[in-house]
């Protein structure tokens, strides 16, 4: 009898030990995920930015997984003047009181106005080349810094969720200031996600939109980031997505551009690189299939999550010229 009690006690001890270890690992994973989510969504003012996951050594990847990333607050280092364009800086408030900063590049007898929105960890200075092309084609341009970037207020990002308010306020500012202008909106990566959300939720009605390198779902793009780090996506991606939304106050699992796309009825041009590892070509196809209005899809072979204009200027310009000529009536 004593032997049975001793055996039972040992089994219970093992079970409790395993449960304790499992619970400890669960807590540790959540702490790591929460730290990573916070650091990815809150910009720092100094230090060295963590390099792209693909370029990290094995040791650097391990250190990043343990310590988290450093994302510096995006700073505009290029202006339209560097491309020979005259511009003026304008500011207007977002709905939550944050001040947004934009550059307006005027075109005499403009065919329309193009609003340009940048991607995650970037700012409006990164879109000067795109703005230059639109200017050459006869359009005025308004390059906008999202909250937390460049000259706008704030120090954090929600990867397009709250940034949709910035798109809304920029669109309303443009409508008030240039009421007779046709409006085209260009969104790169996060900028495209924010644009799709604005159209779906706020019902804005641009004359046409251009999307480049846009992910289809928040969870899938987070999974892609873990794949680039060569780390198992489950449960890492799910935990990071949960904590990212929890810490910044938005429903991250419901932040899905492919769902927003179903509400888009205006003419849309989708540009995407076939080698994009952040927002894969399959995800781009998913977004494209959901768009409800007139649409065109141009793929850039071998291009990653980078500027398609930089990779193939002639193809990018031809795609945009053809789209605007046939869709913007």
Image (tube, rainbow, N blue to C red):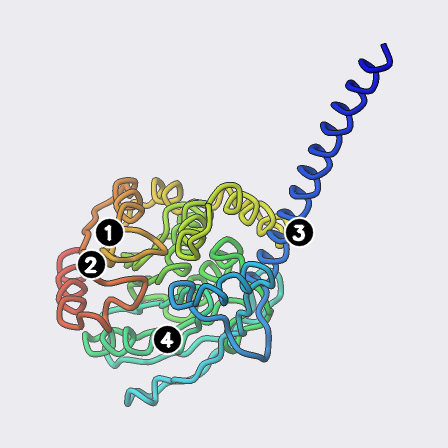
Q: Nearer the viewer, mark 1 or mark 2?
A: 1
SS label for mark 3:
helix
The label number, if any, that marks residue 31 in the structure image: 3
Q: Quadrant of the C terminus?
A: bottom left
Quarter occupied by residue 273: bottom left
C-alpha span from label 1 to label 2: 8 Å
Q: Are the two marked residues, 3 and 2, in contact with CB atoms closer than 8 angstroms? A: no
Q: Position of residue 202 (x, y in %)?
A: 46, 49
Query: Within 10 angstroms of label 4, few (less than 14), some, or many (20 or more) residues?
Result: many
**Residue identifier under label 4:** 126
Q: Residue at x 37, y 75 (%)?
A: 126
Residue situated furthest top in the rendering: 1
**Residue identifier under label 1:** 267
**Residue identifier under label 2:** 328
SS label for mark 2:
loop
Query: Within 10 angstroms of label 1, few (less than 14), some, or many (20 or more) residues?
Result: many
Q: Nearer the viewer, mark 4 or mark 1?
A: 4
- The numbered mark, 2 or 4, whose residue comes first in the sequence reads 4
Closer to us: 181 or 119? 119
SS label for mark 4:
helix
Q: Nearer the viewer, mark 1 or mark 3?
A: 3
Q: Position of residue 20 (x, y in %)?
A: 73, 36
- The numbered mark, 4 or 1, whose residue comes first in the sequence reads 4
Q: Position of residue 55 (x, y in %)?
A: 39, 68
- The numbered mark, 3 or 2, whose residue comes first in the sequence reads 3
C-alpha span from label 4 to label 3: 34 Å
Q: Residue at x 25, y 54 (%)?
A: 270
Q: Are the two marked residues, 4 and 3, in contact with CB atoms closer than 8 angstroms? A: no
């Amino acid at each position: 009898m004593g032997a049975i009690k001793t055996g039972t006690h040992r089994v219970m001890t093992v079970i409790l030990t395993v449960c304790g270890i499992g619970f400890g690992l669960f807590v540790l994973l959540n702490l790591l995920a929460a730290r990573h989510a916070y650091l990815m969504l809150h910009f720092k003012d100094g230090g060295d930015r963590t390099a792209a996951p693909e370029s990290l050594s094995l040791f650097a990847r391990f250190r990043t997984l343990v310590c988290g990333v450093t994302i510096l607050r995006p700073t505009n280092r290029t202006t339209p003047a560097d491309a020979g364009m005259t511009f003026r800086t304008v500011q207007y408030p977002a709905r939550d009181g944050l001040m947004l900063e934009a550059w307006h590049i005027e075109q005499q007898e403009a065919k329309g106005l193009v609003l340009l929105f940048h991607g995650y960890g970037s700012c409006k200075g990164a879109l000067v080349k795109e703005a230059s092309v639109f200017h050459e084609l006869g359009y005025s341009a308004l390059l906008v810094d999202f909250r937390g970037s460049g000259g706008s207020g704030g120090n954090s990002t929600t990867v397009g969720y709250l940034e949709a308010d910035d798109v809304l306020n920029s669109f309303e500012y443009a409508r008030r200031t240039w009421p007779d202008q046709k409006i085209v909106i260009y969104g790169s990566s996060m900028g495209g996600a924010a644009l799709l959300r604005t159209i779906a939720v706020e019902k804005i009605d641009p004359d046409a939109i251009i999307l480049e390198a846009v992910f289809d779902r928040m969870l899938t793009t987070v999974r892609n980031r873990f794949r680039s780090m060569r780390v198992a996506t489950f449960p890492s991606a799910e935990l990071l997505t949960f904590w990212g939304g929890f810490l910044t106050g938005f429903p991250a699992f419901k932040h899905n551009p492919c769902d927003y796309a179903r509400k888009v009825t205006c003419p849309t041009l989708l540009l995407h690189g076939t080698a994009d590892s952040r927002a894969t070509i399959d995800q781009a196809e998913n977004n494209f299939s959901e768009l409800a209005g007139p649409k065109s899809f141009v793929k850039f072979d071998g291009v990653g999550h980078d500027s398609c204009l930089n990779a193939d200027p002639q193809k990018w310009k031809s795609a945009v010229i053809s789209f605007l000529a046939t869709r913007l009536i």
